[in-house]
Image (cartoon, rainbow, N blue to C red):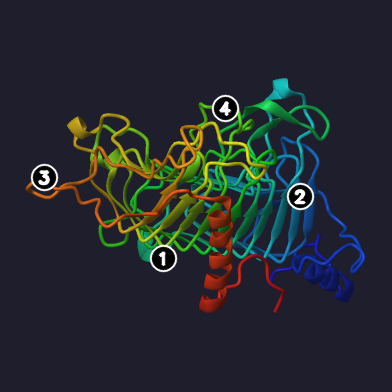
Amino acid sequence: MKKASFFSPSRLCLLVLAASLLGASAQQAPALSYDGPITIRKGGTYRGNWRSLDPNTAAVEIVTREPVIIEYSNIESRGNLIRSRYVRANVTVRHTRGVALNPSLPASARQYPGRFLLLEEFESATVENNELIGTSGMYFRKYLGNPAKGQTIRILRNRARNIDGRYSDGKNRFSDIGAHIVQFLQFNDIKDIAKAEIAWNEIINEPGKSRVEENINMFKSSGTPDSPILIHDNYIQGAYAVSPAADKKYFGGGLMLGDGSAKTLDAAVGFIRAYRNQIVSTSNQGIAIAAGHDIEAYENRVISSGYLPGGTPIAAQNVGLYVWDLYGDKHRKTFFNNVMRDNLVGWARPLISPTAQHPIWFPDCAQTASGQSLCTGNRILQAPITQTMEAQEYERWKAKLRNAKVAIGPQTPR
């Protein structure tokens, strides 16, 4: 392991770090001591605790193409936590806890919590067993990797709480109106990537403490015919407007598998598979395909009662599953072969009536040669869809983790 000058691998430091990663209380271990922001200029493995109190400075800035591993660390920041831009970075982040601090700027600055990881014009990213608290998630733009070298994106076994795009509104306050569009995971212009995988992540957002758009968004990004982007076995709970009881124009949700209009196939989103995910209470939609080609969602569980925890209806509650050519791209021949099949859906609309549902909407699903829809086998749960049913989904998720022997979030150092 490469030890940077800012890391002292003393026995006490390792004990404190391990206790933090296990979620120990302040009474069980000494408080963590943080160093200031760092810039990584050489490849290697880095461990430490870093904090940035400047919204314009990342806690960790990576400015090398050499492979960098950040592990068993604690990061806090008023801006981005880990960032690399334009250097064709190769980054692994694992067993690390990241906490976004309020930028503590006036609302006019339009500053929102920092990204846990922001990569632009990069070659590879592996993000495993981390914890994200109050961040604006992860943003990946412009993949420049070589699939033949195994360079790809893998987002596995992470735990996220309250993905938040709300604007800061002064010292340790957030706006009750304005927000930036953020995601747990945003792909932007990730083209022709092989062996990309997003799996076994747990994302939970609470109303009044978060503001995510889609939890996972595939924007003008694509896998390959032989190796589609795989989004599977994730648990996603909650996607809410800043004011979820009042805002009817909120368009966020669970999975946006196809997003962004495209005039050519090279520019279009495509070759994506989403399966065995659990989507709970995500307001506007559960799973959506609004653009692209060769996208398939199957064997997912999508459930929403349409109520906030206190029993107030969600104003923007819309639809469980949809396949809709939002941008009118069929005439450009960039919207085709999109299917949702064999999913379980219960999607209540309590503002209409106690038993009203809107589980599926497939105006633009792929069809057979004889004109029959391929969006078949979807099972609709009987109304009413309740908050008890939502809670049961989380218990189902925990049992699923136990049975698969999957551990999410940071683990202790080896």
Residue drawn 61% across the image and 42% down it: 308
Q: Earlier in the sequence, mark 4 or mark 2?
A: 2
* Alpha carbons under labels 4 and 2: distance apart: 31 Å
* Alpha carbons under labels 1 and 3: distance apart: 40 Å
CB contact under 8 Å: marks 4 and 1: no
**Quadrant (top left/top right/bottom left/bottom right) for the C terminus:** bottom right
Closer to the camera: disc 4 or disc 1?
A: 4
Residue type indicated by callout 1: Gly
Secondary structure under tag 3 reads loop
CB contact under 8 Å: marks 4 and 3: no
Q: Nearer the viewer, residue 339 or 139?
A: 339
Closer to the camera: disc 4 or disc 2?
A: 4
Secondary structure under tag 1 reads loop
Residue 76, numbered circle: 2
CB contact under 8 Å: marks 4 and 2: no
Residue type indicated by callout 4: Asp
Residue drawn 64% across the image and 58% down it: 42
> Which residue position holds label 4?
247
CB contact under 8 Å: marks 2 and 3: no
In the image, taking residue 189 as reference, residue 227 lies left or right, namely left
Residue 371, numbered circle: 3
> Which residue position holds label 1?
150
Q: Earlier in the sequence, mark 4 or mark 1?
A: 1
Question: Outermost residue toward the left?
Answer: 370
Q: Nearer the viewer, residue 394 or 49?
A: 394
Q: Earlier in the sequence, mark 1 or mark 3?
A: 1
Mark 3, other Cα within 10 Å: few <14 / some 14–19 / many ≥20: few
Residue type indicated by callout 3: Gly
* Alpha carbons under labels 2 and 3: distance apart: 54 Å
- Rendered location of residue 301, percent (x, y): 43, 57
In the image, taking residue 348 as reference, residue 412 lies left or right, namely right
Res 141 visible: no
